Amino acid sequence: MLVMAVLHLGFLRKHFLAVDNDNYKAQFLKTNDEGKVLEISDLKAFTRYSVVIIAFTGDVNAALIEGKASSPVIVSTFEAVPEDPPNNITFQKIPDEVTKFQVTFVPPSEPNGNIQVYQAMVYNEDDPTAIRIHNLSVIDKTDQSVTAMIEGLKGGHTYNVSVYAINGAGAGPKIQLKITMDIKAQHDGNVTKWYDAYFNRPRPYFTNEGFPNPPCIEGKEDLSGKEEIYVIGADATCMIPGSQDKICNGPLKPRKQYLFKFRATNVKGQFTDSDYSDPVKTLGEGLSGRSVEVILAVTLCILSVVLLVAAVYAFARIRQKQKEGGTYSPRDAEIIDTKFKLDQLITVADLELKDERFTRPISKKSFLQHVEELCTNNNLKFQEEFSGYLCPNEFIATQGPLPGTVGDFWRMVWETRAKTLVMLTQCFEKGRIRCHQYWPEDNKPVTVFGDIVITKLMEDIQIDWTVRDLKIERHGDCMMVRQCNFTSWPEHGVPETTAPIIHFVKLIRASRAHDNTPMVVHCSAGVGRTGVYIALDHLTQHVNDHDFVDIYGLVAELRSERMCMVQNLVMWSLNGKKLPCKY
C-alpha cells in the first residue's frame, strides 16, 4: 500500500515526516533537493494513519526538538480484497428439508474493508459446468461467526460449495466443502396389509418387501436397459389362514378398479414414490375355455340370422317402393319441406317489399341505395343454405371449441385434413368464455389433446388479426395448419369500418390459391360471424365475375345447411355494406 505526501518546502532545507497508528510507526527524512513527493509503502489496507511533517534547518537529531511541526493529518488507505477466506466452515442439514442447508463459518481475519456480502459458488457433481452463484441469506451474525442459508438444491445430489467474502475491492479467496443432500421421505399414510385391504376396508397395501437392484458384475452385460415384468395379484398362498400380518402379493377382486405405483428406497430408509397409474379394472370371474367357445359360437349365429333378416327386409322394401314409383327418403322430405318454407318466406318478403323499385339480382349501380333501404326494414328474416363460391364443400362451419370438445375439434381438423382455420371471436367476450384456447400458450409451445400433439411454430400479431402456424402430430404423422384469428370484431354489434375484414378475407383467399382442402370457420356459436365471413368470401369473388349480387339467394344457401347463418339483421346488412366500401 502506497501513500504519497506532497511537501510545500518553501525556503526550508529539510523536512522530517512521522507516520504512525496503534500498530505502525515510521519516520522519513526529506530534503529540498529530492522533490516534493514521498511514497510510503507496506501500509495496511483500509487503515487510518496519523501523518505529521516537521520542518527544520539544523541537525537532524534536533529536528524533533527545534523543528516546527504541522498539525496531524489523518490518512485512510484504500480497501483491498480480503486476504484470507472464511474459516472453520461447517454445515448443518435441516430436518425434512432436501433443497437447502445451513452453513456456519468464521469471517476472514483480514477483511481489508467492509464485507458487503458472502457468496457461494455451487455446482452439481453430475454436471460440473452448470455453476450457480448464490448470495448467502445470513440468518445469524456475530463478530465471531456467521450462519447463512444455501438454497435451490435437489435431494439425492452431491454438491461442491465454495464460500467467499466480497468487499468494495472485490472477492477474496474461497473455502470449499462438499455435501450430499438427502431424499425427502414421503408420508406412508394409511398403508396396510393385503389381507386387511381385501377382506376388510380397501386401503393401499404393499405387494412385497422390496427387491434390490441387480448386482453389477465386472465383464457382464449391463442389465439396466432390460425390462422386467411384475405380475400384481399372482400369489395365491395369501389366502392361506395365518397370512393376516404378511406382506403379500395376493389376488385382486374381480370387476374392481385398482391403481398402483412404485417406490424406491435408499440405504437410509428414505423413499420416493412414482405417480399413481391410470385406473385398471380387473375382469369378471373366469369361465372355462370350452364355455367361452360355446358362448361365442351361439352369439355369432344369432347375429348372423338377425343381419340376414334385416337385409332381406330392407331389400324387399326397396323393391316395393320402386314398383310404386321410386324411393322416397326422409332426407328428400326434409329438402322438400325446406324448399316449401323457403318459398313461403320469399313470398312474404315480396309482399313486404311490394313498393321496392329494384329487381333481383341487384346491379352494382343500384346496390348502395338498395342496402340503405334494406337496413330500414326490420321484418326481413332468412333461413337458407350456404356453399363456397366454387366448391360446395369449401367451408366447414363449426362452433368454437370448449374445454370438453377441444379434442373432438382437433380430431375433426385431422380427419378432414383442413389446413386453414379462421377464428372470428376472442376467447373471452362480454364477461364470458366464448371459445377455449385450443392452441399452445406463449410460454408452452406444445399442447397435447388426447393423441394429438399441437406445436406452435410461429405467431404474427397484427393490429386487426393474428396469424399462427401450427404443426399437428398424431401416431407419427404430421400436417401443417395456419390459424387466422380476426381480433377486431367488437363485443357488441359489428365493426364500424369494413376495411379490416375485407382485407382479412382477401388475405386468406390469396394464401389458399393452390389449396383445395376445406377451410374451418368458427366464431362462438358458429353461425353469426361465421355466416358473415362465408358470405363475404363468396361475394368478393362473385363481383369480380358478374355485374350483380344476390345476397338473398346466398343467405338462403347458407341457412339451408346450417340454421341461423348470418344470425341477425345487423350482421346480414353488414354483408351489403362491405362491398360498396371496396368497389
Image (tube, grey):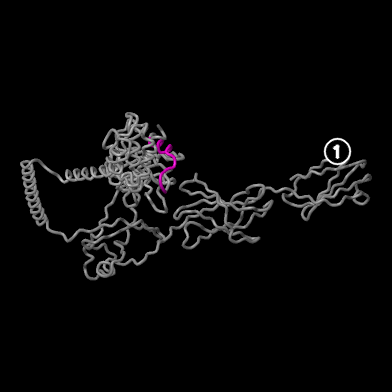
Q: Position of residue 99 (x, y in %)?
A: 48, 56
Q: Quadrant of residue 2?
A: top right
Q: Quadrant of residue 288?
A: bottom left
Provide the residue span drawn in magenta: 492-505
Q: Is residue 220 visible?
A: no
Q: Position of residue 25 (x, y in %)?
A: 80, 51
Single out the residue that lies furthest toward the front. 355
Q: Residue at x 53, y 50 (%)?
A: 122
Above or below 408: residue 91: below
Q: Is residue 150 visible?
A: yes
Classed neighbour count for the residue bearing mark 1: other residues with Cα under 10 Å, few (<14), some (14–19), many (≥20) = few
Camera-nearest residue between 73 and 562:
562
Q: Position of residue 387 (x, y in %)?
A: 28, 38
Camera-nearest residue between 403 and 348:
348
Residue bearing mark 1: 34
Q: Residue at x 36, y 56 (%)?
A: 274
